[in-house]
């Protein structure tokens, strides 16, 4: 939900089964969540497309909405989309979130 700074997961019937927003996280790291990837361990990595220099560009959160790590850099542009790869260069997870 990009500009709402919200990520939702819905089941096949369209029911929201999980969500996370800036209201759930310290320092409100989500800034236009354009890209999201669920990792095999159940955590979720979220981009911040509108982030600028010095702001959080990626955040990994647990199902319990705890921040695992975040990535910040000095580039002016945020990150629109990304893909986490394993040590062999293969995509992590089988089912990217859409």
Image (spheres, rainbow, N blue to C red):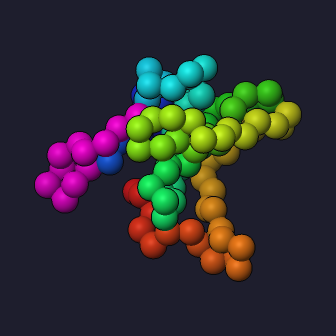
* Position of residue 24 measured from the top left corner of the image (x, y, whole percent): 44, 25
Q: Position of residue 64 (x, y in %)?
A: 41, 38
Relative to residue 14, is residue 45 drawn left or right? right
So how many labels did they put on this image?
0
Does 87 appear in magenta? no
6 with respect to 54 (left or right): left
- From this view, report whether residue 23 is shown above or below residue 58: above
Quarter that holds the C terminus? bottom left
Report x, y in % for residue 56. 69, 32
Q: Is 14 rendered above or below residue 83?
A: above
Q: Quadrant of residue 55?
A: top right
Name the residue located 18 percent from the left edge and 50 percent from the top edge: 14
Q: Report the quarter where the N terminus lies.
A: top left
For image coordinates 41% across by 44% down, the residue present is 63
Say left or right for 37 vs 10: right
Of 55 and 42, nearer the camera is: 42
- Residue at 35% across, 38% down: 19
Q: Which residues are magenta?
A: 10-20
From the viewer's side, name the closer residue of 17 and 53.
Answer: 17
Q: Position of residue 25 (x, y in %)?
A: 51, 26
Taking the image as shown, residue 25 lies to the left or right of residue 16, namely right
The answer to whether one can see residue 81 in this image is yes
Residue shown at the point (66%, 41%) measured from the top left: 69
Q: Which of the 4 image quarters holds residue 60?
A: top right
Report if residue 17 lies within the magenta region: yes
Visible in this render: residue 32? no
Please identify the residue farthest to the left as the structure is shown.
Answer: 13
């Amino acid at each position: 939900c990009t500009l709402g700074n919200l990520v939702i997961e819905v089941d096949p019937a369209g029911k929201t089964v999980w969500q996370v927003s800036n209201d759930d996280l310290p320092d409100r790291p989500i800034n236009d969540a354009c890209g999201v990837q669920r990792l095999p361990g159940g955590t979720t990595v979220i981009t911040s497309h509108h982030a600028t220099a010095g702001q959080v560009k990626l955040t990994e959160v647990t199902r319990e909405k705890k921040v695992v790590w975040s990535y910040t850099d000095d580039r002016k542009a945020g990150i629109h989309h990304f893909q986490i790869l394993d040590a062999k260069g293969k995509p992590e997870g089988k089912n990217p979130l859409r």
